[in-house]
Image (cartoon, rainbow, N blue to C red):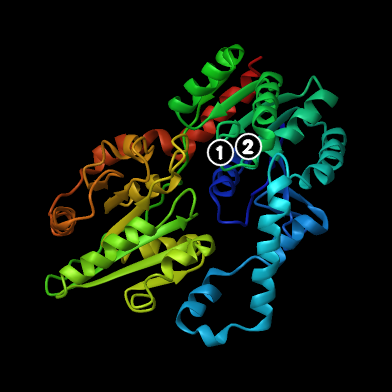
Amino acid sequence: MKVLIISYDFYPENKPNAYRWFNVAKIWKEQGVEVFVISANKNQFLPYEEIDGIKIYRSTEYFVGNIKYKYRENVQEESQISKHNSSIDIKKFLKKGIKKIYDFTWSKFYWPDYSFLWYFSTIPLASKIIEEHKIDKLITVSWTFTSHMIGNKIKKKYPSLFWLADTIDVFSFNGKINNLFFYEKQNRNIEKEIFLNADYNTVLTEKIRQKYVELFPDIKGKIAVNHNVYLPNSFDFGKEPDLDSKTVRFLFLGTLIEDARSPKRMLAIFDMLIKKYTEYNFILDFYGEFSDTMGSFKEYPHLLGKSIFLNGFINREEVNLAIKNSDILVNVGNKNEFQEPSKLIEYMYSGKKIINFCSIEADTSLELIEKYPLKLNVLSEDKCDENLLINIFNFLNSSITIDKELLKTIVKDYLIDEVADRYFNIIKKDIR
């Protein structure tokens, strides 16, 4: 079997789609599948390389598409600006200016999403790979939705090619994708066309599947759920308790976006916690992408570099150590009620305590974390008052634990072997 995967994000990027499909592809390669991938070069990656037997091609977004990667803000630089305003130089000023121009012009009119220029270079490259290597299975991964646009075009050109459209993030009923004033009807129409033209579709949750079947009844027989993925490891996440220590380390891993996953409420509660329990040394470490939310962090200059520490993305080994050295893991829910929080699976697998800050009443994190006993949900309607601080403090000091067998049961459907097998059974059976 020869499979072509088209995904805007892919290895070596440390993003959910890249993590998911790189590890699925590695398992398939070990099973004898020949795997080809097309992703975006993002002004930084090689046009071709082979990693672990996976043939990875990268196509361009041309000048305008690449400029956003050349001039995007670096969160570590920004955190330094928070502490040393005098260090802002002309180069940083220009980068911020270019980003603002991009946000108020180009980003208001592109369709279907910010990667649309990638479509034009990927179509001919995909056609060449399909013809030269006799590809018989095509998989497109959304987000970004442009991947599905590419798949739709290829399917029309090669109708006998089996096409699986894997939707990680919803499109037509996601208000943050593009300018809905211009494109709401167009978004709905193109997503319906793609779901119907694909031979099979997969989504992350049953709630998403039901929503799509409600919108597009004709796809009911060819859409299934395949959950987020976690790659288990034998790392020991246990931390030796220090009964004399008054230091409590909180850890957040992932991406924060002001409109979708804002840290505002979490930071306000953390500040209140520090002021109430002055005998404790509370430390909150962030690892990931936070440049869009720097305004929220700058509201707490007295905490930056002292109680709050901002860092960029780290590799897998560093992630394991960060989790091990933490006492409490922090999750911030997404305002999109149709997105499954992948980071929570990794959190649960560690067996650590989790504080889950919900962003909306129908936060999807609530369902995922429901059976996990070492959690405290801070609901969107909870008042930020004395009672909440007491509940959090009591949770920090509680002695609850989790049975390893229960943990295995909770995360079973999310483990990489399970997820890879579900995908493989779909494309192997060639369900049409």
Q: Which mark is residue 180?
A: 2
Left or right: 351 with respect to 40? left
Residue 58's spot in the image, x, y percent? 76, 51
Res. 132 image quadrant: top right
Left or right: 391 with respect to 110? left
Give, as a three-letter code, the residue at label 1.
Gly
First-in-chain label (2 vs 1): 1
Q: Nearer the viewer, residue 95 or 128?
A: 95
Q: Nearer the viewer, residue 181 or 72?
A: 181
**Disc 1 secondary structure class:** loop
Q: Looking at the picture, does residue 185 appear above or below residue 356?
A: above
Residue receiving disc 1 = 175
Looking at this rendering, what residue extends furthest in the front direction?
A: 181
Left or right: 338 with respect to 64? left
Residue 153's spot in the image, x, y percent? 80, 30
**Disc 2 secondary structure class:** helix
Q: CA distance from mark 2 to mark 1?
A: 7 Å
Q: Residues within 10 Å of mark 1 (few under 14, many from 20)?
A: few
Residue 401's spot in the image, x, y percent? 17, 49
Residue at 48% in and 37% down: 417
| Residue 162 in sight | yes
Mark 2 and 1 residues: CB-CB less than 8 Å, in contact?
Answer: yes
Give, as a three-letter code, the residue at label 2.
Leu
